[in-house]
């Protein structure tokens, strides 16, 4: 996710028109409110410094859906769904994440990837980290439920233009 100047956040493609990202990426950018039409998603890129490595696509964001049931500063359900201005053509480099269903079982660990952003700027390629899974069924079910609600845009605050808080 970026504003044509620099990359700000990572996201996951949910389907051919929606991206899942952190709520902090959608609401606060350098602690300022932003206009949705100023931000874009770069889809399918692996190496941010190369223009020939993969066939990525830059797409405008038309709407943002954010769960605010517990207030803007609550850390539960701290995600946002970015609605792309056009549907993507899926390919080898552009495809949705495979999300588990509730009856899936997993080993004790996994791997997460993402671009790092630090005082030195963003990393060129995604970093990789091994993680240990924690058994917290209540939290997992609540998070999956909130994601499902946001994905279906039921009962959530949807932002089409500038974000305004009172």
Image (spheres, helix red, strand yellow):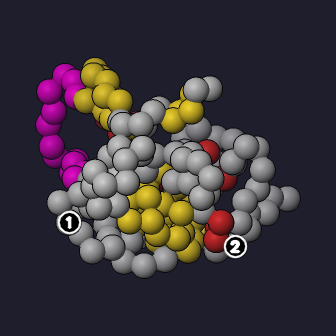
- Residue 161: give its label: 2
State the image coordinates of residue 64 (x, y, percent, origin top left): 57, 65
The image shows a total of numbered marks equal to: 2
- 99 within the magenta span: yes
Mark 1 and mark 2 residues within 8 Å of each other at the beta carbon: no
- 127 within the magenta span: no
Magenta residues span: 98-110
Q: Nearer the viewer, residue 71 or 50?
A: 50
Helix or strand or loop: what does disc 2 sit on?
loop
Quadrant (top left/top right/bottom left/bottom right) for the C terminus: bottom right
Image position of 148 with respect to 114: above or below: below
CA separation in Å, label 1 and label 2: 30 Å
Front tag of 1 and 2: 1
Which residue is disc 1 drawn over? 91
State the image coordinates of residue 37 (x, y, percent, origin top left): 64, 71
Image position of 125 with respect to 51: above or below: above
């Amino acid at each position: 996710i970026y504003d044509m100047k620099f990359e700000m956040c990572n996201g996951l493609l949910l389907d051919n028109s929606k991206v899942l990202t952190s709520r902090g990426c959608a609401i606060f950018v350098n602690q300022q409110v932003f206009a949705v039409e100023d931000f874009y998603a770069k889809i399918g890129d692996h190496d941010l410094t190369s223009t020939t490595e993969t066939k990525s696509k830059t797409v405008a964001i038309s709407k943002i859906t954010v769960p605010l049931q517990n207030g803007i500063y609550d850390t539960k359900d701290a995600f946002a769904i970015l609605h792309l201005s056009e549907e993507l053509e899926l390919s080898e480099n552009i495809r949705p994440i495979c999300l588990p269903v509730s009856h899936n079982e997993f080993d004790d660990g996994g791997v997460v990837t993402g671009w790092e952003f630090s005082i030195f700027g963003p990393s060129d390629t995604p970093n990789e980290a091994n993680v240990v899974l924690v058994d917290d069924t209540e939290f997992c079910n609540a998070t999956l439920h909130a994601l499902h609600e946001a994905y279906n845009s039921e009962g959530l605050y949807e932002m089409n233009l500038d974000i305004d808080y009172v």
